[in-house]
Amino acid sequence: MKVEEASIPGVYILEPKVFRDDRGFFLETFRKEVLERAGIPADLVQDNHSRSVRHTIRALHFQTPPGQPKLVRCARGSVFDVVVDLRKSSPTFGSAFSLDLSDENHLQLYIPVGLAHGFCVTSDVADFVYRCGSYFNPESERGIAWNSPELGIAWPTDSPILSERDRGNPTFSDYPGPWFP
């Protein structure tokens, strides 16, 4: 598995070796020792799976400190995946990074604590898998508006399908905190 740091410190793109033949393909989606060698904490304790239709935006979600690191991938279909740095001391605070994840490219993204995450479905249907480094805690769940103008994210849809919660999230500049150190 190839591991490469993205433009936001602590965010990693993982590209597995894919073995293809006339039957299909085989790949490893998780190998603890590979992540640990790259400096990625690999104590992941919870898996989540969502299915969404084209133009669905699930964003920009995060958990307040202590936070929840994630290893994410698109198991079916394709998504435009986005992370936003919420760490006040980071040189990339307020910056967004995006990457297309799909069942064709098999890329994964490791998202450390202190970043908001979201995605937009670009195929008819997408199955999205999250491997999390802490258990879900609804009291710590927060969000920032997916279309916060100061973030400059070029979402690939003009007709987003949003949850009621995501429609009500504050913009990045209006988020009251707490921020991450």
Image: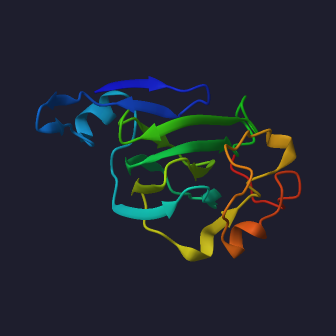
Q: Is residue 163 above or below residue 62?
A: below
Q: Nearer the viewer, residue 75 or 77?
A: 77
Q: Is residue 15 above or below residue 47?
A: above
User: Residue at horizontal 43%, vertical 67%?
Assistant: 135
Q: Is residue 120 something one can see in this rendering?
A: yes
User: Residue at horizontal 74%, vertical 58%?
Assistant: 144
Residue 59 percent across, percent down from the top left:
64, 57
Q: Is residue 13 above or below residue 142?
A: above
User: Residue at horizontal 74%, vertical 40%?
Assistant: 153
Residue 52 left/right relative to 177: left
Q: Is residue 132 something one can see in this rendering?
A: no
Q: Is residue 93 above or below residue 55?
A: above
Q: Nearer the viewer, residue 7 or 39?
A: 7
Please, which colouring scheme is shown?
Answer: rainbow
Residue 70 percent across, percent down from the top left:
46, 50
- Image quadrant where residue 33 sits: top left
Residue 164 left/right relative to 147: left
Residue 49 percent across, percent down from the top left:
39, 63
- Image quadrant where residue 151 sits: top right
Residue 157 percent across, percent down from the top left:
69, 48
Quarter that holds the N terminus: top left
User: Residue at horizontal 83%, vertical 56%?
Assistant: 171
